[in-house]
Image (cartoon, rainbow, N blue to C red):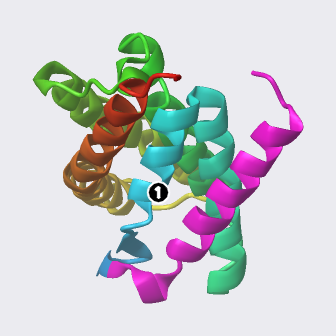
Amino acid sequence: MNLSAKTVVIIAIGAALYGIGGLPMFGIPIFANTTLKPAMAILALFAVLFGPGVGFFVGFIGHWVTDLFAGWGVWLTWVLGSGIVGMIIGLFPLLTKKRLKYGHFKLPDVFLFALLALLGNVIGYGCSALLDTILYAEPFTKVFIQLCIIAAGNALLVSVVGYFILQSVAKRNSQCRNLTEA
């Protein structure tokens, strides 16, 4: 990953948007310390547009920002989980050979995006749940229920909202590609 000034600025903007958008006032509380965050679509967008490295840092730093401002302390296990989610969703441009960049977002890409959203949430927050059980002696049943709710809810939310955003990005990119120099 190239940590150019542009990349650092992209990470900072993405992390700030994800971090502030992830605050409880913008989420839907579902279970003990578990909130469905529409800001997950922001994480997915930055990950898809800029790749797994940016996705990881936007998720990691953004979740840290959310925890700091929410007032419940920083839970590094869940901060790491958000980073992993961003990294996995960020595999999308590599697996699709950057078709979105050229204005293509067809049905197989939609399914791949939804699959990466689900896998990212299961693996990322699965690590969080496992680490909570090991490091903080959290009850396995509680963290497992949190994982199931968050993975399913986030995957669905990211897939639906992300579909419309990525469809718009593909349309814009295809229009920009049709321009020619005079």
Majority secondary structure in the magenta region? helix
For residue 40, side relative to residue 46 (left or right): left
- Vertical order, 176 against 45 (above or below): above
Identify the residue at horizontal 38%, vertical 73% (top origin).
35
Q: Is residue 101 magenta?
A: no
Where does residue 95 sit, x and y in percent of width and height? 39, 13
In this view of the protein, can residue 172 be seen by the observer? Answer: yes
Where does residue 70 sit, x and y in percent of width and height? 62, 84
Where does residue 120 sit, x and y in percent of width and height? 40, 36
For residue 8, side relative to residue 182 (left or right): right
Span shown in magenta: 1-28
Q: Which is more toward the observer, 93 or 156?
A: 93
Mark 1 — residue? 42
Task: Answer few, some or many: residues within 10 Å of disc 1's Cα (few below 14, many 20 plus, some between 14 and 19).
Answer: many
Secondary structure under the numbered disc 1 in the rendered image: helix
Q: Quadrant of the N terminus?
A: top right
Identify the residue at horizontal 56%, vertical 63% (top origin).
18
Corner quadrant of residue 137: bottom right
- Vertical order, 68 against 42 (above or below): below
Q: Is residue 21 magenta?
A: yes
Check disc 1 and give the amino acid type: Ile
- Vertical order, 119 against 43 (above or below): above
